[in-house]
């Protein structure tokens, strides 16, 4: 018996190309109509890559045609362009969020590689670059928000403007937004699908960010619905991939880079975190997670290795006390400032 429920179940087996989530949970299936045994499905995509639309169309058509008892299958595909940066009146290209110059995503294929630590300190280091750029940091890791703690603002709650926009929290010169400001330490975040999409869009488009030179976006690990929401909500200037040197992390880093390639977001470079352990007693470096992984991945992608971040106790202590290590002068702090300088000098993300 053909009905809407089992058609939706079949569509739920089809993943968005490059992602680990299916087209139903992404909210791309807008309607399903059944008339006798005939099936009509409406799908809406936001992509500039015609190959993605063709692949999804083909997989949907094939899957539904193979359903037992299925009659004619009609697919109504609407393909629209995602947010983009367009020249206006001959002026410099503008960001898709008013007032924001450049938007940089910090991503990883897996958790535990220190992505949020990198995002927090990269934001701080960018704010200390030449010209003292104005920087914001949006924590889109709804399920494991840590930016509030890393900036010492875990007990602070945001206010709203008269226009009902969220006012970001400010710390160390950085404007911040995170789910961590909305919950206490014991509250789990139980959201999925449309609600996760809504929170993400609200953090990005309904915050009073004001005038910023850079907005750094801390993405959750993996290739799920929040990542797709981000690339369809704002025009990213590029993404930075964070990995550790060992192969198990590189496997997932490749998935993240492949995801951005699917949605036409340039990879600005690779940051190898936890590249070596810096012994506090004698300064000796130990390659706990192996060597050369980040460099190998950058070479494979044809992008720069932006820098190597060592493991040192000061970084952990700084994250726990809410004072990012990039505010200091340690070897790790210097590494973050070098990375920020390279990003600021990249034509895709320079302020000029």
Image (tube, helix red, strand yellow):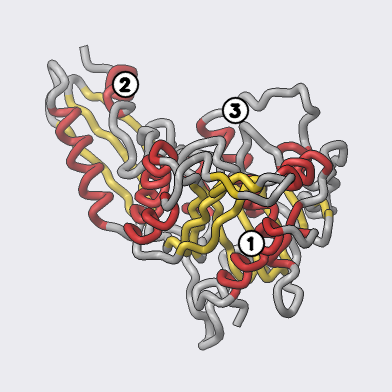
Q: Which mark is residue 335?
A: 1
Mark 2 closeness class: few <14, some 14–19, many ≥20 residues within 10 Å: few
Q: Is residue 65 above or below residue 154?
A: above
Q: Residues within 10 Å of mark 3 (few under 14, many from 20)?
A: few
Position of residue 212 relative to residue 262, above or below, is: below
Residue in the picture at 62% in, 24% down: 190
| Foreground tag (1 vs 3) | 1
Please state which of residues 82 and 290 is positioned toward the viewer in this rendering. 290
Along the line of sight, the residue nearer the viewer: 90 or 78:
90
Q: Which residue is mark 2?
A: 9
Q: Position of residue 92 (x, y in %)?
A: 55, 83
Compared to residue 167, the image places residue 189 above or below, namely above
User: What is the CA distance from the residue labelled 2 to the residue labelled 3?
Assistant: 21 Å
Tag 2, which secondary structure? Answer: helix
Number of numbered discs? 3
2 vs 1, front mark: 1
Label 2 and label 1: CA atoms lie apart by: 48 Å
Q: Quadrant of residue 49?
A: bottom left
Asked if one can make out residue 73 in the rendered structure from this viewpoint, the answer is yes
Front in this rendered view, residue 248 or 10: 248
């Amino acid at each position: 018996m053909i009905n809407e429920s089992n058609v939706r179940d079949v569509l739920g087996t089809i993943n968005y190309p490059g992602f680990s989530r299916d087209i139903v949970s992404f909210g791309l299936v807008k309607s399903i109509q059944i008339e006798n045994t005939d099936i009509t499905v409406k799908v809406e995509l936001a992509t500039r890559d015609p190959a993605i639309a063709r692949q999804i169309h083909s997989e949907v058509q094939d899957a539904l045609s193979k359903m037992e008892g299925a009659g004619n299958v009609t697919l109504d595909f609407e393909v629209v362009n995602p947010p983009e940066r367009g020249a206006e009146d001959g002026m410099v290209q503008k960001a898709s969020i008013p007032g924001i110059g450049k938007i940089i995503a910090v991503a990883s294929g897996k958790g535990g590689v220190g992505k949020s630590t990198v995002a927090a300190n990269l934001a701080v280091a960018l704010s200390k670059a030449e010209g003292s750029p104005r920087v914001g940091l949006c924590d889109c890791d709804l399920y494991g928000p840590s930016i509030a703690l890393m900036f010492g603002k875990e007990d602070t709650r945001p206010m709203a403007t008269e226009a009902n926009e969220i006012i970001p929290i400010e710390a160390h010169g950085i404007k911040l937004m995170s789910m961590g400001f909305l919950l206490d330490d014991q509250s789990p975040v139980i959201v999925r699908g449309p609600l996760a999409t809504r929170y993400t869009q609200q953090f990005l488009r309904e915050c009073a960010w004001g005038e910023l030179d850079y907005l750094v976006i801390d993405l959750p690990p993996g290739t799920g619905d929040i990542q797709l929401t981000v690339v369809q909500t704002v025009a990213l200037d590029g993404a930075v991939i964070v990995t550790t040197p060992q192969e198990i992390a590189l496997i997932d880093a490749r998935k993240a880079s492949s995801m951005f390639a699917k949605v036409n977001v340039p990879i600005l470079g690779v940051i190898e975190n936890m590249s070596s352990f810096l012994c506090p007693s004698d300064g000796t470096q130990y390659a706990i997670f192996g060597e050369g992984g980040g460099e190998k991945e950058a070479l494979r992608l044809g992008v720069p290795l932006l820098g190597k971040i060592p493991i040192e106790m000061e970084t952990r202590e700084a994250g726990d006390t809410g004072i990012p290590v990039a505010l200091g002068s340690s070897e790790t702090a210097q590494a973050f400032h070098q990375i920020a300088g390279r990003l600021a000098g990249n034509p895709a993300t320079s302020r000029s």
